[in-house]
Amino acid sequence: MAGRSGCTDCFDSRECRSLSHVDLPRCTRSTRRATVHFGSIYHALLILILFFCLVPVPASAYPAAVADLVDAPRSASTGEEIVALNLHQRSTAPEIANVTVNASKHAAESKAIVTAGSSSSSQLPIAFDTMANNFANASCVQFFSDHLEKPTVANCRPLSLYLQNSNSFFHDLRSEAGTSRVLDATCADPVDECATSMTSLAEKLLDDDNCGQDFNAGNTVVQSTYNELKAYEPLYRATCLTNPATKNYCFVDAVTNASVPNDYNVYFIPIGNPLGEGQITCNECLKATMDIYAHWATIDQQSLDTTYLPSARTVNDYCGAGFAKTNVTVGIPKTSAAGVNRPLGNAGLATFSITVVGAILSGMI
């Protein structure tokens, strides 16, 4: 009875009966409050534990976006992840195996697979996909819209326009497979027909009714576009060369050789950028490329009229005298519509090349 009377202040008669064998001290008011509070928390925790243990969370309760990303590989930054995903999707497209040494044979094989209506073609780069309309005349804006962003250019897929005016091509450069796929398509195009079309567009560009006034005013976009249109054929012939040692396109080998940026810079010579100082790979690809440039440097109104000889001398400094031809009578450069060509210069080219090499390295990591 001592136990029962000792608990009457804290519990009802039923609880006291169950604990009658225990001698408890008389509870104070504060003890009663603490006991009741603790009991409530204890019971609440038991209920929660039972609930989470017995009631499974359905998979459909997760947002679809989260469920889709659970097993996906992640990268250091969201932006890089998006680019990596896009490149992965592109690399799954049908590709042409067994790159041949002969450029014309390679182009013929490619043409059978890459066509204007194919899914691969729809993923190819687009020129001027991020260009701002910083033109003085509305007629120039209209010319770019009507001609340079339409099938005439798209069907020929000019690498000369992609190098400095295509964000989509910049992303393709981060993948060897993606770069090869672009060249499979461009090298399958009819070079003679496309060269005629590009030359015609270059001349139309300089009409006062189109972009002639912007050209004369020193608009760098218009002036570089003129150089790039004129450089279509020499760049076509240079970038479609294949390396007999690696069986890759020479251009692909140059782009992926991140340790020697000047290998890639060689392909900017025809669009107005002389080769800067720096290490370069002295191989058959470079020699064949410089031979192509030497021929086109003798033709009037090519950027090579001004960029070839200084570039050839730079090459010979590293590869030995006579590696690149210097006994060349260059043509007369375009100086007007009227105006003077304004290439990027070595500083601008170096910045662009560092950006590309950085992107390639990040894609390899």
Image: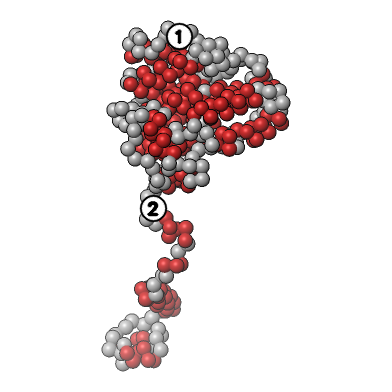
Judge left or right: residue 333 versus residue 328: right
Q: Is label 1 in a helix, a strand or a loop?
A: loop
Residue at position x 43%, y 24% from top? Answer: 238
Distance (Cα) linking label 1 and label 2? 56 Å
Q: Position of residue 192 (x, y in %)?
A: 51, 27
- Identified by mark 2, the residue type is Ala
- Colour basis: secondary structure
Q: Where is residue 206 in the image (x, y as percent from the top left)?
A: 65, 22
Q: Is label 2 in a helix, a strand or a loop?
A: loop
Where 196 falls versus 18 (above or below)? above
Where residue 207 sits, quadrant-wise, is top right
Where 77 falls versus 217 (above or below)? below
| Residue 337 seen by the camera | yes
Residue at position x 71%, y 30% from top? Answer: 139
Judge left or right: residue 161 versus residue 285: right
Task: Locate the N terminus by quadrant.
Answer: bottom left
Q: Mark 1 points at which residue?
A: 328
